[in-house]
């Protein structure tokens, strides 16, 4: 079974589309972890056959809470504005059964603007060659490996990078040739160039050892 774990906080504008896209059925468990939303997120979520878990706000904390409630042998951590296909989930299952410890999907942004193709390519190269996976690429991992790592570090930013670095030290990982399609809302609201430069700046700061608490002050969630 694959447990799809989705952390949410005030996601009424996006979560309906994401849940509607999922192939509910045998072998799929969907867990939505609410970080104390005060909008209609929970009302939207209740329309679907999902397990709802409540958690203190914080993506790492919420994903760990979802994993604690999950029954699957494989965990897929999905952002609330990100979609994967049934074909991608089938491929995930195949690769994990062939001794891959985990990995991510290929990054795709849901827009026809040419500049996004460049952002997608740079993200794919990062994941493929540096083995650094971002959360909006839908990170997946075997349960036993997740437990061995100890889950996500409770940091306010770059929990996905810290986790993927630990993951890649424990065995073979794969960047699946199937899309994790993310909504372009952050780029569209803050500006494509500005957002991309900020992402590079934050990543460079993280690599140089600046604390995630300081970096998180520069990062604002967009909904």
Image (cartoon, rainbow, N blue to C red):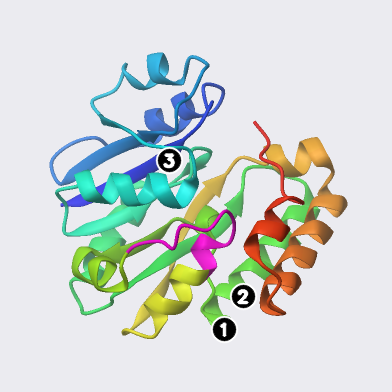
**Mark in the foreground, 3 or 1:** 3
Mark 3, secondary structure of its residue:
strand
Can you identify the residue that label 1 sits on?
A: 129
Residue 96's quadrant in the figure? Answer: bottom left
Q: Residues within 10 Å of mark 3 (few under 14, many from 20)?
A: many
Q: How crowded is mark 2: few (under 14 residues within 10 Å), some or many (20 or more)?
A: some
Residue 11 picture location, percent across and down: 52, 27
Disc 2 to disc 3, C-alpha distance: 24 Å
- Segment colored magenta: 151-161
Can you identify the residue that label 2 sits on?
A: 126
Residue 54 picture location, percent across and down: 33, 31
Residue 198 picture location, percent across and down: 80, 57
Q: Residues within 10 Å of mark 1 (few under 14, many from 20)?
A: few
Precedes in sequence: disc 2 or disc 3: 3
Disc 3 to disc 1, C-alpha distance: 28 Å
Q: Give the side of residue 73 with respect to residue 3, left or right.
A: left
Residue 212 picture location, percent across and down: 64, 62
- Whether residue 177 is visible: no
Quadrant (top left, top right, bottom left, bottom right) of the C terminus: top right
Please tell me the numbered disc located at residue 189.
Answer: none
Decide whether the magenta segment is chiefly helix, strand or loop. Answer: loop
In the rendered picture of this protein, how many numbered marks are placed on residues?
3
Residue drawn where x is 38% and y is 86% of the image:
169
Residue drawn where x is 16% and y is 59% of the image:
73
Can you identify the residue that label 3 sits on?
A: 7
């Amino acid at each position: 079974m694959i447990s799809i774990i989705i952390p949410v906080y005030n996601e009424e504008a996006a979560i309906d589309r994401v849940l509607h896209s999922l192939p509910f059925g045998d072998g799929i468990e969907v867990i939505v972890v609410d970080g104390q939303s005060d909008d209609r997120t929970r009302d939207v979520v209740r329309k679907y056959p999902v397990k709802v878990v409540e958690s203190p706000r914080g993506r790492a904390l919420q994903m760990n809470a979802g994993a604690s409630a999950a029954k699957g042998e494989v965990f897929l951590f999905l952002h609330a504005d990100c979609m994967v296909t049934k074909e991608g989930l089938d491929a995930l299952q195949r690769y994990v059964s062939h001794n891959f410890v985990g990995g991510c999907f290929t990054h795709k942004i849901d827009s026809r603007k040419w500049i996004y193709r460049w952002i997608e390519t740079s993200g794919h190269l990062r994941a493929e060659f540096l083995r650094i996976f971002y959360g909006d690429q839908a990170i997946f991992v075997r349960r036993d490996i997740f437990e061995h790592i100890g889950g996500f570090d409770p940091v306010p930013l770059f929990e996905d990078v810290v986790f993927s670095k630990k993951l890649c030290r424990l065995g073979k990982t794969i960047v699946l040739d199937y899309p994790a399609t993310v909504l372009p809302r952050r780029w569209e609201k803050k500006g494509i160039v500005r957002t991309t430069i900020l992402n590079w700046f934050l990543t460079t700061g993280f690599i140089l050892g600046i604390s995630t608490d300081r970096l998180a002050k520069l990062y604002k969630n967009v909904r």
